[in-house]
Image: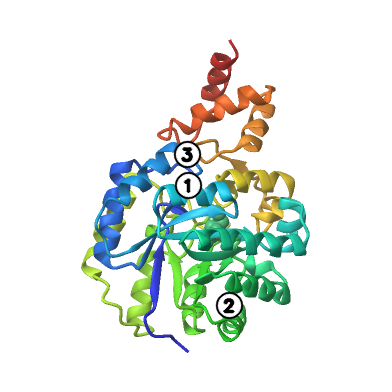
Amino acid sequence: MIKKNIQILDTTLREGEQTPGVSFTIVQKLEIVKMLDAFGVDFIEVGHPAVSADIYKSINEINKLSINAKTVAHCRLKKVDIEQALDLKMSWVGIFFGTSQSYLFDKYKIDEKKCLEMIKDGIKYAKDNGLKVRFTAEDASRTDREFLLNVARVAENAGADRFSIADTVGILYPEKVSQIVSFFVKNLNIPIHAHFHNDFGLATSNALQAIQSGATCVDVSVNGLGERCGISSLAEITMSLNELLKVKNGWNFKLLNEISQYVKNVTNVSRNDIMPITGKNAFTHNGGLHVASVLNNPSTYEPIRPNKINREHTFVIDKFSGKTALNHCLKKLGLKFNDQIIERALTDIKSNPQITNWTDKQLSSLMEKLNS
Ligand code: HCA
Ligand code: CU
């Protein structure tokens, strides 16, 4: 059953910026926020402040705008991240933590009990400091249902204001979405959000199903930008909700084309780049956490092995990169450095947000400079 007051969270500035080759300037971010607000989205996920200084600064500038949409800062389940959101005077944080077996055991190396404790403590910390919390169970779609219910209940009891179900590797299809979403709508008191990746081309259908099954908000990005094949797109979701499901929301459709064109012009990402399976980015990983996890266990962020279709995965080095990603790329170039130099290299990489894909040559000369 479709709830009243369906909402949209746009994450072009967070998820969308994780598209290989994309890095918005602060001026572009301010422009995008103004357009999204004028269109009428309810939440704007403005970025993950801990990633880089330019992201932190852009959030600070965005918060000076007078807009109706609520801005949300993306945070790991870590005090340092939540503290940055507090410094930025956010009212909302989107805290995410992977809950599937492989995330717990391969990515974080913790057990279920520890996971629940961390979720409780992290959310409580944010709530005690006055933040509104949307808690996302990353890889929820591959998490055991009973355990996910424990996670959701712990999150709700710790004070979370929203529970978001992330289909991080895009493996759901509408029937499964219906089962999962209805189950959580029935069992929780807080509103349910959902986030669908497009690895099998089902992100739009899945988001529409989530709304039909009682979710109150789905995540979108302009032109469907995001890691690998991206997520549900703003235009497809709002127009299908309006035209097909007769959801009324006051969206200013006259602005939709302009927003899409603006983002297309400043990103230069083509539809083919983010096309499922055969698109250029289908097996490319960008975010630091993504690359580190894939190196350890590819299935964490790959729903199918790329060699099934005679492809290989690739990694991008840019402001989103972490230590593991950088070490891996340098190793491939036959280079090895101590931690201190790696840290300095990362600082340099993160302070050059305009370089969206460091080439081997650029990396080698940076390392040479730092090592001399
Ligand atoms: C990521 C993963 C994420 C998180 C979604 C969310 C996903 O951090 O890149 O926090 O709402 O798909 O699970 O985008
Ligand atoms: Cu995502």
User: Counting residues from the N terminus, which is met first, the one under dot 2 or under dot 3?
Assistant: 3
Count of number-bearing discs: 3
Q: Please identify the quarter of the rendering in which residue 114 is found.
A: bottom right
Q: CA distance from mark 2 to mark 1?
A: 34 Å
**Is the CB of mark 3 within 8 Å of ligand 1?**
no
Amino acid found under the numbered disc labelled 1: Gln
Q: Which residue is mark 1?
A: 84
| Amino acid bearing label 2 | Val
Residue 177's disc number: 2
Decide if residue 254 is on the left or right side of residue 350.
left
Decide which of 243, 53 is in the foreground and name it: 53
Type of the residue with mark 3: Ser
Residue 105 horizontal/vertical position (percent): 77, 56
Q: State how far apart marks 2 and 3 are (Cα).
A: 34 Å
The location of residue 139, given as percent across then percent down, is 63, 63
Give the numbered dot on residue 52.
3
Which residue reaches farthest top?
372
Mark 3 neighbour class, 10 Å CA radius: few under 14, some 14 to 19, many 20 or more: many
Above or below for 123 versus 25: below
Sequence-wise, which precedes: disc 3 or disc 1?
3
Q: Which residue is found at the position 44% from the left and 53% from the top?
A: 16
Displayed quadrant of residue 103: bottom right
Residue 167, compared with residue 270, is above or below; it is below
Q: Nearer the viewer, mark 2 or mark 3?
A: 3
